[in-house]
Amino acid sequence: MRLILLTLGFDEKFAVRGILRYAPKPDDVIAIVTASPLIEKAEKALRTLLDILKSYAGIENVEIIEVDISNPESAKRKIRELISKHDCELIANLSGGMRALILITLAAVLSSDRNALIELETENLENVVTLTPEFFKPEPIDESDKRILRKVAEIGEIKLDDFAKVIGKSRTTTYRILKKLVNAGYLEEKKMGRGIVYVLSGKGMLMLEE
């Protein structure tokens, strides 16, 4: 048994293509997430998708969840409750629907702490990107990273070449260290003239206060 979660907007093609890839079985649960209120275009796409599910694989075990994207926290909680009802393999196809709906559904999947396959199909239909929740977790920060943050905090803001001299490492190694901390949200890159300086972010400041 699998829970196949699909986001749906005005066009059912992404959901249909996902269904064809998954080859759902009668005991699979299909959950369709759409934004409320359900306007005419979305309603038409939903009807088409339901017809295909029934005629293609005899799937009638379908749950439709309408969420108010103007209240993201409530919408996320509603989707997460649906996920928690089904203790089985989770596939989340986030290819269809509005960006807000997709991001809220992704947040619900990640906050559910479930092993999941997250799938996104490109707009030109040429590629399918598959991710797991691990992809979204920040790289762990160790004591050497904290020393770098303390040094940046001490200096205030610094350029790459200057910082390489301060810590006694090559420019390439220093860039890799700083970029890792930028990607993790502990440092920020700011333009200064023709160059870039590195400064501590709010998240970095909190890290040093712990």
Image (tube, rainbow, N blue to C red):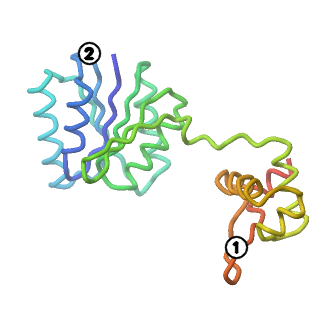
| Farthest-out residue, bottom | 193
**Marks 1 and 2, Cα distance to the nearest angstrom?**
55 Å
Indicate left or right for 115 with 120 as reference: right
- The answer to whether mark 1 and mark 2 are in CB contact below 8 A is no
Indicate left or right for 8 with 55 as reference: right
Residue shown at the point (85%, 52%) measured from the top left: 208
- Residue 196: give its label: 1
**Mark closest to the chain's N terminus, 1 or 2:** 2
Q: Position of residue 64 (x, y in %)?
A: 27, 36
| Amino acid type at mark 1 | Ile
Quadrant where the N terminus is found in the figure: top left
Q: Position of residue 103 (x, y in %)?
A: 44, 50
Q: Position of residue 172 (x, y in %)?
A: 73, 57
Q: Position of residue 136 (x, y in %)?
A: 56, 42
Q: Nearer the viewer, residue 160 or 22?
A: 160
Quarter of the image where one finds residue 47 = top left
Q: What residue did someone put label 2 on?
A: 27
